[in-house]
Image (cartoon, coloured by chain):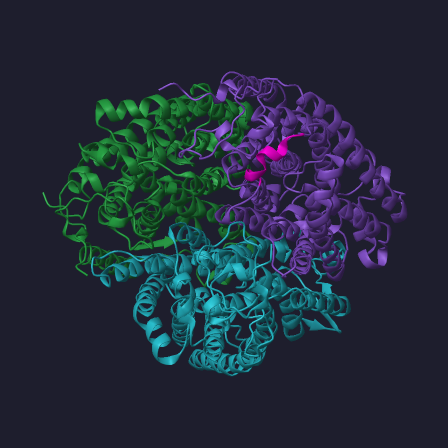
Chain colours: A cyan, B purple, C green
Amino acid sequence: MVWNTNLRWRLPLICFFLEVALVVLFGVFVRYDFEADAHWPEEKRHRNIASDFENDFYYRYPSFQDVHVMIFVGFGFLMTFLQRYSFSAVGFNFLLAAFGIQWALLMQGWFHAFQDGYIFIGVESLINADFCVGSVCVAFGAVLGKVSPIQLLIMTLFQVTLFSVNEFILLNLLLVKDAGGSMTIHTFGAYFGLTVTWILYRPNLQRSKERQSSVYHSDLFAMIGTLFLWMYWPSFNSAVSNHGDAQHRAVINTYCSLAACVLSSVALSSILQKKGKLDMVHIQNATLAGGVAVGTAGEMMLMPYGALITGFISGIVSTLGFVYLTPFLEAHMHIQDTCGIHNLHGMPGLIGGIVGAVTAASANSQVYGYEGLLHAFDFEGTKRNRTTELQGSFQAAGIFVSMAIALVGGSIVGAILKLPCWGQPADENCFDDEIYWELPEKQENAIYHSEDPALKPETP
Amino acid sequence: MVWNTNLRWRLPLICFFLEVALVVLFGVFVRYDFEADAHWPEEKRHRNIASDFENDFYYRYPSFQDVHVMIFVGFGFLMTFLQRYSFSAVGFNFLLAAFGIQWALLMQGWFHAFQDGYIFIGVESLINADFCVGSVCVAFGAVLGKVSPIQLLIMTLFQVTLFSVNEFILLNLLLVKDAGGSMTIHTFGAYFGLTVTWILYRPNLQRSKERQSSVYHSDLFAMIGTLFLWMYWPSFNSAVSNHGDAQHRAVINTYCSLAACVLSSVALSSILQKKGKLDMVHIQNATLAGGVAVGTAGEMMLMPYGALITGFISGIVSTLGFVYLTPFLEAHMHIQDTCGIHNLHGMPGLIGGIVGAVTAASANSQVYGYEGLLHAFDFEGTKRNRTTELQGSFQAAGIFVSMAIALVGGSIVGAILKLPCWGQPADENCFDDEIYWELPEKQENAIYHSEDPALKPETP
Amino acid sequence: MVWNTNLRWRLPLICFFLEVALVVLFGVFVRYDFEADAHWPEEKRHRNIASDFENDFYYRYPSFQDVHVMIFVGFGFLMTFLQRYSFSAVGFNFLLAAFGIQWALLMQGWFHAFQDGYIFIGVESLINADFCVGSVCVAFGAVLGKVSPIQLLIMTLFQVTLFSVNEFILLNLLLVKDAGGSMTIHTFGAYFGLTVTWILYRPNLQRSKERQSSVYHSDLFAMIGTLFLWMYWPSFNSAVSNHGDAQHRAVINTYCSLAACVLSSVALSSILQKKGKLDMVHIQNATLAGGVAVGTAGEMMLMPYGALITGFISGIVSTLGFVYLTPFLEAHMHIQDTCGIHNLHGMPGLIGGIVGAVTAASANSQVYGYEGLLHAFDFEGTKRNRTTELQGSFQAAGIFVSMAIALVGGSIVGAILKLPCWGQPADENCFDDEIYWELPEKQENAIYHSEDPALKPETP
């Protein structure tokens, strides 16, 4: 098989095609919602809105900006730990996310905000689009270094669609709560990504092993990503919650969970090393598991100590995963998980769904207040008579639905991506920016698949 | 000519002189506006303001913080791509911006907020000062590596003044809208900077060529700058818009335009390289053009698909500029544009002005609502009878005025900066931190102009 | 003495013990305050709160996020300047802060928010916890490179307690104002840290001297920290101020002070170097002194020119400190201050306390308005009859109390940390990540204390 990584026509064509399609679809469907439309002064009068401050923009914009930073800098830089793949990590994350947020505005719009033939968007749509793309960034972590940007665009195209379907089932049919996406973003994204990488298994990946590690300064670049994810996660888990106490509470719960997670990650990292030394991979990744694990329950009355316990356990599970589970999955199940997403998004996502289900099931009007309980779980309309125990069961069902769609969808998309026409690199050319980028410096000791026409040296 | 880069007396003297002058002028003129003054509790009663939340601080502070990050980290780190000039890039940007925002508070204050002999400042003043300094950061990009910090302070002194004059003409005389500064910041800043660098043309700059490029990790530092500019641009374009729908809409338009811009920048970068490889320069710069290009129209009813089209075109124009136009301008017109600001701020700024003019001219009360139209374009008072077509013409006039002031002002300032007394480096010592900084490590293979007394090696 | 830096049991055990204790204490004591509790819909009715926007979350969350970034990225990356200690700098800062914010929620909660046997927390509690931990980050700067993570956790345990005691005395007994913590955070944190490092004096530290400096790219990583601290300091100084004008004013004062500080820091850095070259250490640190120095007076009617003067002086004092005082303290007083915290937090903290005292003493109802004066200084209840001159005296007393508690507390904690059982490195193994981290690359020319069992090479 010839691995042709010269993307000179394929990549531009797919980018142009996608963007033109987006423009047409936006032209047909997408409009500003009433809070972003110039009719707002009149709308305020009609709806008896006293102040401009009741515009949802002011409730959600600060959180939106933090989520935006998590998607582009958080994920983008977290993946720069690879010594020779940093350009691709941050650059391809940039590309897939820029495409993904546009496609998500349409997809999620059709499912959630379609009215009179139009999709009406506001700041909450932007947040939800960023969330959707977050699940693609998660999956990217599993295939990082082994795929071409074209494969990433295709994966984004399908994954955004599957995410929107899953989200619709969970939020609109099962009527579960998942404000921080433990199920819709992390569980779904991780198991989708793991399935894809399993299908795209590379038997000779060890030929690229020397590049599948960090160097001192690339670990520092990755810490930039880690810290922006860690610090802004309270915004992530509260960005789409109800105004008032729910946003406030989700911030507190996430803050607590992440703090506890750091301590248990550090403890495990040390105890599992012969000389007690810490491993940057754990500090970069496992410390974030607490944020994933309170995605669902963050806006619920989890209680601060409940958040601490959740974070504490997540850090342990995540670090154990990095040390034992990821190597096992690679050696025995052919799952080559570059970033260890199973340890940060997979297992903690499941924890998050479970914690959410339990917290929902044990909710009652004493803890929440009568009105508070109705408000927190939207027990109105069709959900009017749902008990909290039933809500808990639906929450749990949400975990299974997310997993199922992830596994089935991941298989289909993996099969599509396995076609040899997307410009993917040969097994010995993985984790190497040289393949897709004009690098400022020559890379020494490069071993290239000699048949790849893109890599034949230029005759001087 | 002797290039004396020892700044030991000149730099401190100019810093002290400027700061003392600023203190005196602030003492004479600058006061807190009523929302930042301790009389606020009484003012609230007088003005029938119900809640502290009506203080403009809450409407604008989150956006202000993002703009602040763009000026200091965004521009500062974007320019660290130069392998041996990162200290100067981020450090001199820090210096000129810290000086510039103080001088801008005065300058813009005299033009816009002068009342009873005082300049009253609030958070919107801080935003506008940051905006003004943004145009200096733009111009810095053209002369980066070839000027001393003293020249930068002088350039800032004059450019802030010219910016304020231009801004006054556009916003107060022509009564145009330019919330995101496509004309006042980007067009003005770019053509000013290009004029200055043309006047400061260095015939032997190729002697420093080996340093006028990046290395692997300096490109990553630059991506930090790129991403913070890209992510926070919605705040930049909405920070001074009307409360409510205008701020909300400008965020949505900018988000969309920037997303589309990424796809077309990547497409062009790939298609213009023989093997389809991407160039970090394009990913760092061209992907931002969409933000510049919706600076004017962002708060207008550009429609999401209109924003996508604008961003899409901007990415194409910008990348073509980097590949073809900048080398051409350097070879044939003696314009040595270090950062390619013409491609990110010049041409996209013109696009932004044009898009703004067209969008304004085609505005009507159906799209905006009757009240909305008046509100969006301030069609009241002296502007009461202005038609949207006339508004569009004035918008277009704003482009020309900005260009004119940039070219004339740039010529004058360029001539002043050409005086050989400002500590500028010789042609062979450009792009080199060693000139102005105590570096932690020795630079190998340094070639220095032997006459510069600042660079004679110390006798041991 | 045997320096055993193998932390394999001690570090995990202390992390587990601390976290379990925190979980238990949170379970017993910590609850959401009424604005984060699900009873909020009912509470709104009881308290006649018209809109969700009156939830303190919306007033303070944007500022909280900026403070959070300052603690984790600002301090964390500022300390990465050390060429071979960046992992420990950012990693240990992460650990001590994650532990510290949890412990601070309890400690400060017992002192300030204890009601009916519970500690009620909201976003302002999170901000105050971050503030408290900020003082630990300050102290960390003095001992950076010379302590183990266990020592840092112990230092955090005690320092958070001492901070809370000091804060209680100042804010609740002396009834002073110190919104930005010039006294409670910076003065206290710095003199505490300096006392600890004095007690932990290392006579043979010169054996590690070769690593106690930066390299080109570590100075750039540190600039990330510097800039995020600098840009977000307005949020830091306004985060807990009264709603409305106080928050707005503190932002303006801090913005101005920091801008002036940059100019005087650059001036001094240049004038004190033989060839006028700038020193990155000054640009990274002294430029921040202006923020420290308006911590107390920031929310007062300091006036913009007053803020400029304060910042201007702080930059001079700070840079002089770096050039002359820190070496003096090291050579003659055995104070090995790794980051020069005395120059950034110590002296500017004192300046801040003094400026606060003077500004308070000179306050009057003409400048503040009658109501404004009462509101600004909480002249109500027990403080009803306090004059501004008396307030000024109390402010000054606050400086002395903070210093006293810092010196006494620092001595006790220093003595505890001097015990040889905490896994601290030998004098020749300081400033070296290799001691506590699995590094991706081997360090050349490592000189290790041969007795340390943790550092014996593994037999192959």
Say which quadrant the N terminus of chain B sits in. Answer: top right
Figure label count: 0
Residue B318 seen by the camera: yes
Which percent across, then down, holds residue B428? 57, 29
Magenta stretch, overall SS: helix
Rendered view: B305 above or below C296: below
At horizontal 14% and vertical 46% (from top left) the residue drawn is C450
Which percent across, then down, holds residue B38? 55, 31
Q: Quadrant of residue B71?
A: top right
Return the residue nearer the eye: B342 or A111: B342
Which percent across, then down, holds residue C434? 27, 49
Residue A5 seen by the camera: no
Return the residue nearer the eye: A277 or C442: C442
Say which quadrant the C terminus of chain B sits in. Answer: top left
Residue at the farthest left position: C1
Q: Quadrant of residue B165?
A: top right
Q: Is residue A16 magenta?
A: no
Which percent across, then down, holds residue B366? 85, 59
Residue at the farthest front position: A460
As drawn, is C353 to the left or to the right of B101? left
Rendered view: C410 above or below A220: above
As drawn, is C441 to the left or to the right of B421? left
At horizontal 81% and vertical 56% (from top left) the residue drawn is B369
Which residue range is magenta in the image? Answer: B203-212
As drawn, is B149 to the left or to the right of A116? left
Return the residue nearer the eye: A270 or A349: A270
Rendered view: A337 above or below C46: below
Return the residue nearer the eye: C438 or A393: C438
